[in-house]
Amino acid sequence: MVTRARERLVDAAGALFYRDGINATGIDRVIARAGVAKASLYNNFAGKDELVAAYLEQRLDQVTRLLDELDAAYPPSRRVDAFLAHLEHAARRGTVRGCAFANAAIEVSSDSLARTVITRFYDRLERFFTDALGADAREPDVRQLVICYDGAMAIAAAWDDPAVFTAARAMAHAVARGATRDE
Amino acid sequence: MVTRARERLVDAAGALFYRDGINATGIDRVIARAGVAKASLYNNFAGKDELVAAYLEQRLDQVTRLLDELDAAYPPSRRVDAFLAHLEHAARRGTVRGCAFANAAIEVSSDSLARTVITRFYDRLERFFTDALGADAREPDVRQLVICYDGAMAIAAAWDDPAVFTAARAMAHAVARGATRDE
DNA sequence: TGCACTCTGTACAGATCTGTCTAGTATAGT
DNA sequence: ACTATACTAGACAGATCTGTACAGAGTGCA
């Protein structure tokens, strides 16, 4: 075989689920895009729910790899901005339709396999922000950075305005310099 | 009749669409909750899409009324915090499942009737924030406040943590005092 | 060559969803 | 009492969706 059916399925599901939404995308559209028989889907996954989880797992791998790279390439004080700059760049190329995990959290039921992947994403994101803030990281500061991320992504999905990341970056700078704490 | 079927339908749709998602909620569940015949739905709405738009329209009315009240009751400098405090209070009562408009933006197709309602919501929200910031309001500051709102709502949907609104309020204070601008 | 495995293509079952239709009931206004 | 209007209950069509079944083709390996 040229590529494993499983990979092709996860890739196709990733593109369609992210662009059109999970519930709005049927199995048939996924296998058509993957160029794969329906039986191959059900040989590799127990059902659609497991395919959704695999799609998010792939996204989590990508994000984890990105954050690991940023951890290695930048000093803590510059990591958050590098992360948001990366998202801004992606948005300017026209590929951002919100946060895949936040979107999935809205679409899937609360007992879905996808839930654990979503929480693992947010765990990793919180750890990234905590490390970036350094020794004097406080819990509210971390939450504020998550707000910067999720807010910018949500707006990028609702409108189509990459400039929102510029605003998010400036706000993240303020968080890092401790300027967003109530006195 | 006790109440008009249309009202009952919009109320039922509002509860179900918001709690379970738009695409995951079928017409039959809506009319069952509304205690209404299916024909009544199609006498009042051309189709599900129009019902979704009516649901968002109702939400927009509620939000508009709230923002108008805040405009009347508070000086500009305290309006944003009053708004976020209101959301925090709602979250602590356990009713927040994200922003209805941001959620809908993810679920509905780009040519849906709902789109215009979504943009009207964001227009109103931006105006509220612009007024609240007063004479020296700058475009990036307004965007940052929208990020605070959308980010907090997205996190409230993904996790179930009302404390995120505390962090959002502190960040909004920083925006208001001009502390989040890059130097 | 033969076996095990993965794949394809397609038909099909069963559920669910949107939307239509018919027939009949309750109610308010004249 | 008559009529227009809004409603109910439920059957039904047609589409779509998830998931299963089956027969056969391609490939790697002993």
Image (cartoon, coloured by chain):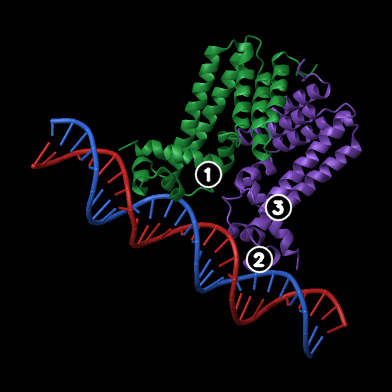
Chain colours: A purple, B green, C blue, D red
Mark 3 packing: few (<14 Cα in 10 Å), some, or many (20+)? many
**Residue at mark 3 shares a chain with residue at mark 2:** yes
Q: Residue B49 or A123: which is nearer the viewer?
A: A123
Q: Please tell me how many numbered marks the rendered image carries.
A: 3
- Residue B22 image label: 1
Q: Look at the image and tell me whether residue B152 can be seen.
A: yes
Residue lying at the far front in this picture: please name it. B93
* Residue occupying the point 57% across, 23% down: B125
Query: Which residue corresponds to mark 3?
Result: A55
Could you tell whether A13 is left or right of A3 in the image?
left
Judge whether A168 appears above or below B109 on screen. above
Q: Chain of mark 2?
A: A
- Residue type indicated by callout 3: Tyr
- Residue type indicated by callout 2: Tyr
**Residue at mark 2 shares a chain with residue at mark 1:** no
Q: Position of residue A64 (x, y in %)?
A: 81, 45
Q: Quadrant of the C terminus of chain B?
A: top right
- Residue type indicated by callout 1: Ile
For marks 3 and 1, give the one nearer the viewer: 1
Q: Position of residue B120 (x, y in %)?
A: 52, 27
Query: Which residue corresponds to mark 2?
Result: A42
Labelled pair 2, 1 in contact (Cβ < 8 Å)? no
- Looking at the rendering, which quadrant does residue A11 occupy? bottom right
As measured in the structure, the alpha-carbon distance from the residue carrying label 2 to the one carrying label 1 is: 27 Å
Could you tell whether A23 is left or right of B14 in the image?
right
- Residue A67 image label: none
- Looking at the rendering, which quadrant does residue D7 occupy? top left
